Image (cartoon, rainbow, N blue to C red):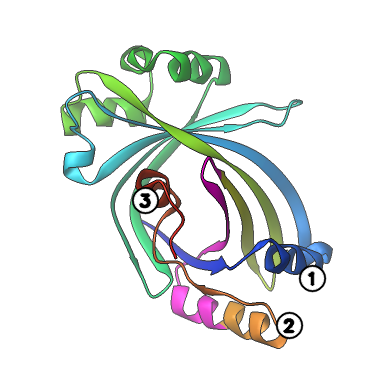
């Protein structure tokens, strides 16, 4: 179970202001390309699950992660989702991105689960989006500040994984208020926004 605080920033200026405040704590920036898949007979979506390939597009060190997410619940700015993730060879990931059926042949714990537990017999690509993620070590937690680039617009979000989400959320909110950062609770996951085809109002 992955538990994360998710807070939405209203616009690019709030995002830039926060990045500037957090610059002393910045440790990495990841250029991510997220692409999603369902079973060819909707086996995953019908059971509230989705398969994601995430490419880290840093040229010196390309990486690819395959991830199964299921039974996501997002309430009061806290997301809880069953998640199983592992790294796969980025060349294999690229081939699967170009031809989703190749996912059937990849030797991967996560993909075995998808086939065995969800009965997937083939895959279809759903498309995806890019994300620029700035990672900051702040106050003993890891803040991930995202600039999500959809075909229909950009969205800005802050995530923080924690086993004490309510306490951490309070800490982040206090910091935002002290520094005049506008924010609101996230009400939809990045994937749900992508599927809706428009930014939440």
Q: Are marks 1 and 2 in contact (CB under 8 Å)?
A: yes
Which callout, 1 or 2, points at the residue further toward the start of the chain? Answer: 1
Position of the N terminus, as image quadrant, is bottom left
The residue located at (70%, 87%) in the rendering is 178
CA separation in Å, label 1 and label 3: 29 Å
Secondary structure found at label 3: helix
In the displayed structure image, the side of residue 62 where residue 115 appears, left or right: left
Q: Which residue is mark 1?
A: 21
CA separation in Å, label 1 and label 2: 8 Å
Q: Which residue is mark 3?
A: 192
Task: Give how far across and how far down residue 114 sits, in percent.
Answer: 26, 30
Whether residue 152 appears in magenta in the rendering, the answer is yes
Which callout, 1 or 3, points at the residue further toward the start of the chain? Answer: 1
Whether residue 26 appears in magenta in the rendering, the answer is no
The residue located at (46%, 56%) in the rendering is 199
Task: Give how far across and how far down residue 172 sits, in percent.
Answer: 60, 77
What residue span does the magenta drawing correspond to?
150-170
The residue located at (71%, 60%) in the rendering is 136
In the displayed structure image, the side of residue 187 where residue 44 appears, left or right: left
Task: Give how far across and how far down residue 197 sits, in percent.
Answer: 40, 46
Q: Which residue is mark 2?
A: 179
Q: Looking at the rendered structure, which numbered label has been put on residue 75?
A: none
């Amino acid at each position: 179970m992955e538990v994360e605080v998710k807070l939405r920033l209203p616009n690019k200026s709030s995002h830039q202001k926060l990045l500037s405040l957090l610059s002393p704590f910045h440790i990495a920036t990841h250029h991510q390309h997220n692409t999603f898949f369902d079973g060819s007979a909707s086996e995953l979506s019908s059971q509230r699950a989705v398969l994601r390939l995430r490419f880290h597009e840093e040229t010196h060190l390309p990486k690819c992660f395959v991830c199964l997410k299921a039974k996501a619940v997002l309430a009061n700015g806290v997301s809880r989702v069953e998640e199983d993730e592992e790294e796969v060879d980025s060349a294999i990931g690229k081939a699967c991105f170009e031809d989703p059926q190749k996912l059937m042949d990849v030797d991967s714990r996560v993909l075995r689960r998808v086939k065995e537990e969800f009965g997937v017999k083939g895959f279809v690509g759903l498309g995806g989006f890019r994300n620029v993620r700035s990672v900051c070590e702040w106050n003993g937690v890891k803040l991930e500040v995202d600039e999500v680039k959809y075909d229909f617009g950009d969205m800005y979000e802050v995530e923080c994984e924690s086993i004490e989400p309510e306490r951490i959320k309070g800490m982040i909110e206090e910091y935002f208020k002290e520094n005049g950062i506008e924010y609101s609770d996230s009400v939809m996951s990045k994937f749900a926004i992508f599927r809706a085809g428009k930014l939440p109002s």
